[in-house]
Amino acid sequence: MSRAYLFPGQGSQQVGMGRGLYDSSAAARAIFDEADAALGMSLSTLCFEGPEDQLVLTANTQPAILTCSIAALAALREAGLEASDPPSVVLGHSLGEFSALVAAGALSFADAVRLVRLRGQAMQDAVPAGTGAMAAVIGLPLAELEALCAEAAEGEIVSPANENGGGQIVVAGHAAAVDRLVALAKSRKGRAVPLKVSAPFHCALMAPAAERLAAALADVRIGASSVPVITNVEAEPNVDAGRVKELLVRQVTHRVRWEASVQRAVAMGVTHATELGHGKVLAGLCKRIAPDLAVAACGSPADLDVLKGPHGL
């Protein structure tokens, strides 16, 4: 049996997330305390109590999700579950790649939480409100959707942003171009649903955010990875510390190749996975990508109790 750790990205946030881990695990509590100290704000209070309109701001959402994921990892390790069944590979969806790097020991948690807060703010600032948009397209092959994006662009930007699996591909770009793409997709018998997002993530419009992240990464130490990290940009395992910064910067403007990443993990022999953090978004995606992959949740004390039981990990 070979296990992967999976780390969620934006979209899994919810007021109250992480509270159970904070109350029940000293190791998880220490992670929340470290996040508060690193950011100079009470991120823990924002996670546990909201208000929701502040938690959903990208600059807050990204460090909140990362912190809940690493708190779950800390609780898992505290319970001795990693020692008995360590991962052979780690991967994360979008900002979850930072969580994966922390899990692999390549990036310190304090650096990661500061970086994703800056990343979130930079992504929010990159495009004026209302200028960009995203939409989920279901039922069209990638090659056909790419051709439709080229047709819909008309001098603007619209391109695939997330290859989520199960026939779902999210596109991002200028709002008018995304609207044209949605109409074209529907005309080809595809389903297209506009998404409520604050910015058009993972497309060329995010170039200013990529530049800000690159500047912030310049002085950050990247260590050796204890296990390979499957990267969003390449959907291939990386253990080269010298490539980590470049791959994180490229990720901001490039699509998240989640379907290919999960398929790569399975090709490496992964049969079981643990989703660390709030929610079960990735478990749902994995069910469509690799139905035989067994995914366990680890985001609450109840999840940990299940994992510690005879039918857990």
Image (cartoon, rainbow, N blue to C red):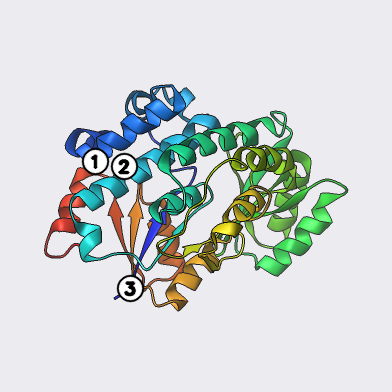
Q: Looking at the rendering, which quadrant does residue 118 occupy?
A: top right
Q: Position of residue 216 (x, y in %)?
A: 61, 37
Hey, what amino acid is under mark 1? Ala
- The residue to which callout 2 is attached is 71
Tell me the quarter of the image containing the N terminus: bottom left
Depth check: 24 or 262 in front? 24
Residue at image x 43%, y 29%?
38
Per the model, the C-alpha gap separating discs 3 and 2 is 23 Å
Instruction: Give the mark, 1 or 3, whose residue is nearer the N terminus.
Output: 3
* Residue at disc 1, secondary structure: helix
Say if 246 sits above or below 47 in the image: below
- The residue to which callout 3 is attached is 2
Depth check: 9 or 180 in front? 9
Q: Position of residue 143 (x, y in %)?
A: 71, 69
* Residue at disc 3, secondary structure: loop
Q: Is disc 1 in contact with disc 2, using a CB cutoff of under 8 Å? A: yes
- The residue to which callout 1 is attached is 27
Hey, what amino acid is under mark 3? Ser
Query: Is residue 92 toward the left or the right of residue 310 in the image?
Result: right
Instruction: Give the mark, 1 or 2, whose residue is nearer the N terminus.
Output: 1
Q: Residues within 10 Å of mark 2 (few under 14, many from 20)?
A: many
